[in-house]
Amino acid sequence: MYTILLTEDKKLEHLLEKNFREACRILVEKDAPALLKRLATEPVDVVLADLDLPEYRKAETVGQLQHFSQTGAVLFLADQELFDSSHPMTSVPAADYLLKPFRDLDLVLALEDTMYFCGKRKQSEEDSVRLRLVREKIEEYIRDHYDQDLSMQGVAQMMNYSETHFCRLFKQCFKVNFSAYLNDFRIRQAKQMLLNTNYTAKEVALACGYQDNSYFIRVFKRFAGMTPVDYRIHARNNVRK
């Protein structure tokens, strides 16, 4: 359910009750200052702002609606003869402008479009949160288990995803495939071990989850441009300088 906030206007209130009572919660305030106060304390999806009211020319009001427009939608109503590009509210991103006099159908269609926009934005925000949580869970798992035998199939199963769905989610989260991400993480860990321990290259390989030393050397060279032994010599020489 969407929440629509507006100032007192019997015709608008009747029109909203008639067309959106089932889909929306309609909040009405006596004037613009009361509307802005309500906006600051209660979740709202759509504001119907009548620009003929003088309060909507105040810098403070403009600032509040600019802030609101980042998460909600503003639908402006304005007298065609009085409204022009010099109005301070033109700096506020608007879902739509309705110039008076407008038909009831025009307002209904504008509100339907605005609520569709709000729905798409909410879905996008929910998807972003979901992807962030999935990304954090994958990062944590790889960070804790990179030294073990990992496969995309195994991690997908651990997270209760099908292999196909997990592959798609992984690409959305990291913009690379599972193998590329895992190798990059392991090689970064290997670089730290080569620089800060006396492990042999083979011991570093095993500690980073590579059972095949020859494969480890090939992967390391692809990422670092040199073998593990050469990297250690080069890195330690640079540290001494």
Image (cartoon, rainbow, N blue to C red):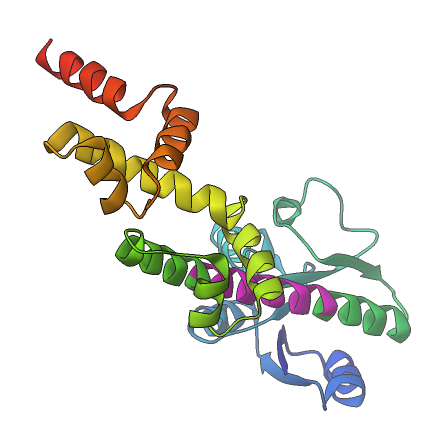
Q: Is residue 82 above or below residue 228?
A: below
Quadrant hosting residue 120: bottom right
Q: Position of residue 140 (x, y in %)?
A: 32, 58
| Residue at (50% x, 55% y) in the render | 67
Look at the image and tell me whether residue 192 can be seen.
yes
- For the N terminus, give its image quadrant: bottom right
| Residue at (17% x, 32% y) in the render | 200
Magenta stretch encompasses residue 119 = yes
Position of 31 compared to 182: left or right? right
SS majority, magenta: helix
Q: Residue furthest top?
A: 241
Q: Is residue 233 above or below residue 135?
A: above
Frontmost residue, 49 versus 216:
216
- The number of numbered badges drawn on the structure is 0
**Magenta residues, as a range?**
116-132
Frontmost residue, 179 versus 13:
179
- For the C terminus, give its image quadrant: top left
Position of 240 compared to 152: left or right? left
Q: Position of residue 165 (x, y in %)?
A: 60, 65
| Residue at (45% x, 65% y) in the render | 154
Q: Position of residue 4 (x, y in %)?
A: 63, 76
Look at the image and tell me whether residue 72 can be seen.
no
Position of 218 compared to 127: left or right? left
Magenta stretch encompasses residue 67 = no
Quadrant hosting residue 114: bottom right
Frontmost residue, 136 versus 203:
203
Q: Position of residue 147 (x, y in %)?
A: 28, 51
Q: Is residue 239 above or below residue 20?
A: above
Q: Is residue 4 above or below residue 80?
A: below
